Amino acid sequence: MAVQAPVTFMFQPEMETLPRERLAALQLERLRRTVRTAYDNVAHYRAAFDSAGVKPEEVRSLDDVAALPFTVKDDLRRNYPFGLFAVPRQQVIRLHASSGTTGKPTVVGYTRDDLGMWGDLCARTMVAGGARPGDIVHNAYGYGLFTGGLGYHYGAERLGCTVTPMSGGNTERQIVLIQDFGADVLCCTPSYALNIAEVADREGVDLRKAPLRLAVFGAEPWSEAMRKEIEERLGIRCQDTFGLSEILGPGVAAECEERAGLHGWEDHFLFEIVDPETLKPLPAGETGELVITTLTKQALPMIRYRTRDITRLTDEPCGCGRTHLRLMRITGRTDDMLIIRGVNVFPSQVEAVLVGFPGVEPHYQLVVSREGVYDHLTVEVEAVAALPQAEYRRVGADVGHHLKSMIGLSCTVAVKAPGEIPRSQGKAVRVRDVRKKA
């Protein structure tokens, strides 16, 4: 079957438009090789497979992946630092790690080939969103052990862009350099882009007059309402991406210019949706927890990694011409989900109500406390500068009423003065749980 000519610019068009039957055959070949490599070279996987009573040679179809054991973040912590590596440590030429604020950090490693593949996929991801060779890319993702900064840095360079490796923080200087260097593309978290917009407004700078045309966002869930807010305030087009360090870093999936979901790069990853309670695979189109198996990672293969992210998948044709399935927008995480008096609440649901609501800014935190034997949710939200303090109570009541009608939960809304909600220099901290301190 001939490959259709792509209708838009692509970084690797032959692979991005591979017919689905050929894509599935490639996935199976790579899955079988990855499973065999993990079993033969990683003691954790060998023990997990043996305990589950499965052998690598029993993987004869893509559906057979459902018989394999899951991998979770605690497996990386238990095998700290290098216990899950499938190659000798001397072949690992890059290490990244989480902050380890909830225990031992999770360590991820890359061979030289892994880094080449990562750069290609980040370039693919940026092109899908609208970046082009020759663009000036202002990279405000954090550099260092966090994978975001360096992932997009090498992807942009692979694409042929000029990169400003700004990292996070020092927002006033970010604004100066965005203007002075004439940045075309901004790479950062959506919450930090909102912070940039706010500081620019405060300093009397209209970034809508700058050359900036595109933002490539990731690292945290965000809503369509947040997209609209940032696009209006910065005068740019905002595109979503998806990645996680345990799987690769940024570059796992990307929203194309059709904005009809995020193309998951299936030549390198196998995507599943499972019921987060039963862990049974769900049919195509149903919403559940995303599970990913890496197909080409050498240093750190991941077999059925539970991402905790909630989404659904579709392989319906996309107008951009790419054949890879799409992840619908991540609506939240199973470990970010709050259960308040029997009601499931995700921060993204609250955000969708707050963004654009009259009288408040889209800066918020959810504070979970305990009142007697019951959990209670307080939504702290920031007033716009022009709102008189005498109006705070009325606006808070309006927000609370709207939240009740939209998510079915009564909560307290505390309207704070401008600047009182902590600002993000990277991933926003949306939930503050004070129950353990009570």
Image: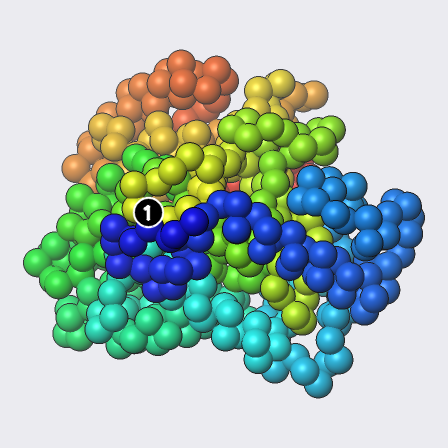
Location of residue 105 in the rendering, given as x and y in whole percent from the top left corner: 67, 64
Give the residue drawn at x 45%, y 63%.
121
Count neighbours of disc 1 (C-alpha within 10 A) and say few if under 14, some if 14 to 19, many if 20 or more. Answer: some
Residue 124: percent from left, percent from top: 38, 61
Q: Nearer the viewer, residue 159 or 307?
A: 159
Q: Nearer the viewer, residue 416 or 348?
A: 348
Q: Is residue 418 visible?
A: no
- Quadrant in the rendering for residue 162: bottom left
Q: Is residue 222 above or below residue 140?
A: above
Q: Quadrant of residue 302?
A: bottom right
Q: Secondary structure at mark 1?
A: loop
Residue drawn at (12%, 54%), measured in percent from left and top?
A: 208
Give the residue at x 43% y 29%: 349
- Seen at 44% across and 68% down, the residue is 120
Name the residue nearer the viewer: 37 or 78: 37
Q: Is residue 229 left or right of residue 325?
A: left
Where does the image place residue 114, in percent across and percent down from the top left? 57, 72
Q: Is residue 378 left or right of residue 385?
A: right
**Percent position of residue 246, x then y:** 62, 59
164 relative position to 116: left or right: left
Q: Is residue 436 placed above or below 195 in the rendered structure?
A: above
Mark 1: amino acid:
Gly
**Residue that mark 1 sits on:** 321
**Outermost residue, front direction?**
1
Of 93 and 230, the residue lying toward us: 93
